[in-house]
Image: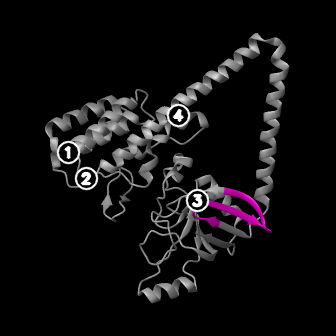
Amino acid sequence: MPSVLRKRSGRVLRPCHLLKLPPFKSVWTIQLNFLFVCIIIAPFLICGCSHFDEGFHFKEANDLFSQGSYKASLSKYEQIIEKYPAAGDRVLFEMGIIYAYPGNEQKDYQKSLECFQKLIKDYPGSGYRKDSEMMIFNINNVIIKDKTIATQHAQIETLHQDVKSKGNEIITLQKKIEALEQEVKSKENEIFALRKVPADKILIEKKERRLTLISNGKALKTYKIALGGNPNGPKERQGDNKTPEGTYVIDSRNRDSRYHLSLHISYPNEKDKKRAKELGVSPGGDIMIHGIKNGFSWVGDFHTDIDWTKGCIAVKDEEIEEIDKLAPNGTIVEIRP
């Protein structure tokens, strides 16, 4: 199995074999990668106290999955739940993931939903309940998105048929294509120009969940962000999961971060230290602007659907790479409520 993850409580957990996902390639493969958006916030809860025989059978099921033998892996899980009914919630959870796994050519969203729903119904006190609820939510969302994508494909096919059957409309369609190509080229030129102009300020607006790069008073680009799990109000103490409010600077960066790449913010400032001292607590630290947890870049924009950090500011991996190039050490960071 891959490396160790930690639950929010700090207890060490063994991650599921299902974290080995294919890289995000294009907009047309988004339906293969949406399924585990919430897992970055609540890692898989794989029990580490199973009896030896039970653990051995789970390893067999995991190995079959790793080999791409999804049907055989599911069959092994069915055997486990018959022999070890007490492990039923874990079995249902992992079966639900396999049924929805992007690499499974025979994936079945309905069966996946049934597994998670049965887990919630039959094991109300299970540690897998919360993750199952999030998976049900996202699978239902993606079913809707799949329908939308299918409709868009049908519209594209209709346009192709129009080009073939209506010769007198070809010129008009070609002009539309040229206009779109010109628009794309214009955007590419804007991005190229953007990368050459360094920012002198980063404005973070917590309420709007927005980060803006500013140069000489002009906004260069804005990004959607996720904040700490307790976003309202300024950070006061270590462990309160709040994102600070105030004026800071970028004072260092880590290109070997567990969250792809990170820019360190100079929290706490003197005001923060004074407030913490008056409260008799530690102000905390390690506040960063960073990307998505390593191995989960395919989550993309979905990560901003929930505030999942410990108080940091999170953007997509490609966005933190862009911010890293445009915001040198010393760049002012203003964080507003």
Which residue matches tag 2?
Answer: 47
* Camera-side residue of 92 and 271: 271
User: Reading the chain from its start, which is encountered first: label 3 or label 2?
Assistant: 2
Quadrant housing the C terminus: bottom right
Which residue matches tag 1?
Answer: 87
Q: Position of residue 334 (x, y in %)?
A: 65, 72
Circle 3 residues within 10 Å: few <14, some 14–19, many ≥20: some
Is label 2 or label 4 in front?
A: 4
Q: What's the CA distance linking mark 1 and mark 4?
A: 33 Å
Which residue matches tag 3?
Answer: 209
Q: Main secondary structure of the magenta part?
A: strand
User: What range of the chain is rendered magenta?
Assistant: 204-222
Q: Which mark is residue 145?
A: 4
Kindly state the secondary structure of the residue where label 4 is placed: helix
Q: What's the CA distance linking mark 1 and mark 3?
A: 40 Å
At label 4, the amino acid type is Lys
User: Reading the chain from its start, which is encountered first: label 4 or label 3?
Assistant: 4
Tell whether position 102 is magenta.
no
At label 3, the amino acid type is Arg
At label 1, the amino acid type is Ala
Is label 3 or label 2 in front?
A: 3
Q: Position of residue 259 (x, y in %)?
A: 52, 60
Q: With respect to residue 201, does 152 lie above or below?
A: above
Q: With respect to residue 32, does 192 lie above or below?
A: below
Could you tell me if the residues under marks 2 and 1 are in contact, i.e. CB atoms within 8 Å? Answer: yes
Q: Residue at x 24, y 41 (%)?
A: 121
Q: Residue at x 32, y 36 (%)?
A: 64
